[in-house]
Image (cartoon, helix red, strand yellow):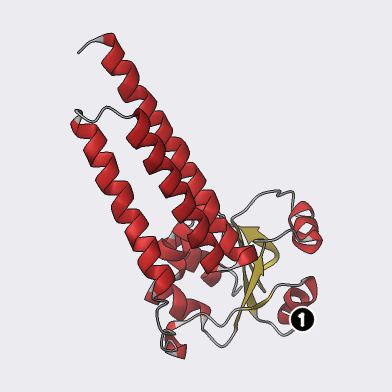
């Protein structure tokens, strides 16, 4: 292939990477402005991308049509979701969820005084690793069962929006980023901080160690 074609392909790839980053950032708007606004912004971004690609793209290239089809399909999916909002999902069985309580220093100390174990989770909607932890570990049945034990208190902090309390909570533990997970208990009164990328076996073992 001629050098010019390589350059055009590189421009398309870099442009798609920038578009993907913009679409991801648009999803974060749902936290502040609602899902509908987020979807509208994504539709506008896709429409602009399609218009620019139609004007500047090489219509004879198979990559051109692949990108057009992919963007059109994604745009159609967003439009469908915007026009046909799904009905409210049925309530999940309580036995299949973790009974999270609001995070506070007082809640940790109160649980320890009562001889209970504590599991702390600080996450945010914009935190990709947090979502991975939820899917791979926290939403697994054996972890849910472990966190639903009568002597376990599950505390969650949400850093989706700025929070002086969470920033201070992390700083006191020499941590400045999320995800943050820690376990406390009679056997771990000072707490043990887990790896940012959670491991199911390690989490359950740490909870067991917290019994003392």
Q: Residue furthest front?
A: 55
Q: Position of residue 168 (x, y in %)?
A: 80, 57
Q: Which one is nearer the viewer's eye here, 121 or 87?
A: 87
Q: Which one is nearer the viewer's eye here, 160 or 139?
A: 160
Q: Quadrant of residue 160?
A: bottom right
Seen at 74% across and 78% down, the residue is 107
Q: Position of residue 4 (x, y in %)?
A: 30, 12
Seen at 80% across and 63% down, the residue is 165
Vertical side of 98 occupied by 166: above or below: above
Q: Is residue 61 left or right of residue 17?
A: left
- The number of numbered discs placed on residues in the rendered structure image is 1
Q: Is residue 196 visible?
A: no
Vertical side of 153 occupied by 70: above or below: above
Q: Is residue 74 left or right of residue 2?
A: right
Q: Quadrant of residue 115?
A: bottom right
Q: Which one is nearer the viewer's eye here, 41 or 196?
A: 41
- The image quadrant where one finds the N terminus is top left
Seen at 73% across and 74% down, the residue is 108
- Residue at numbered disc 1: 110
Disc 1 element: helix
Q: Position of residue 19 (x, y in %)?
A: 45, 41
Q: Which one is nearer the viewer's eye here, 105 or 102?
A: 102
Q: Is residue 36 visible?
A: yes
């Amino acid at each position: 292939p001629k050098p010019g074609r390589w350059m055009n392909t590189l421009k398309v790839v870099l442009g798609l990477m920038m578009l993907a980053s913009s679409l991801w950032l648009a999803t974060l708007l749902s936290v502040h402005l609602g899902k509908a606004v987020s979807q509208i912004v994504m539709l506008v971004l896709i429409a602009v991308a399609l218009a620019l690609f139609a004007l500047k793209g090489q219509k004879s290239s198979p990559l051109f049509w692949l990108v057009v089809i992919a963007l059109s399909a994604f745009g159609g999916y967003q439009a469908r979701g915007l026009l046909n909002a799904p009905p409210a999902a049925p309530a999940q069985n309580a036995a299949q969820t973790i009974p999270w309580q609001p995070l506070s220093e007082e809640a940790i100390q109160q649980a320890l005084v009562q001889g209970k174990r504590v599991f702390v989770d600080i996450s945010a909607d914009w935190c990709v690793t947090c979502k991975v932890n939820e899917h791979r570990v926290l939403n697994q049945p054996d972890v849910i069962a472990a966190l639903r034990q009568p002597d376990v208190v599950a505390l969650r902090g949400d850093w989706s929006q700025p929070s002086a309390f969470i920033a201070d909570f992390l700083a006191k533990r020499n941590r400045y980023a999320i995800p943050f997970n820690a376990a406390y208990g009679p056997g771990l009164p000072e707490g043990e901080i887990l790896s940012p990328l959670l491991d199911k076996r390690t989490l359950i073992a740490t909870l067991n160690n917290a019994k003392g």
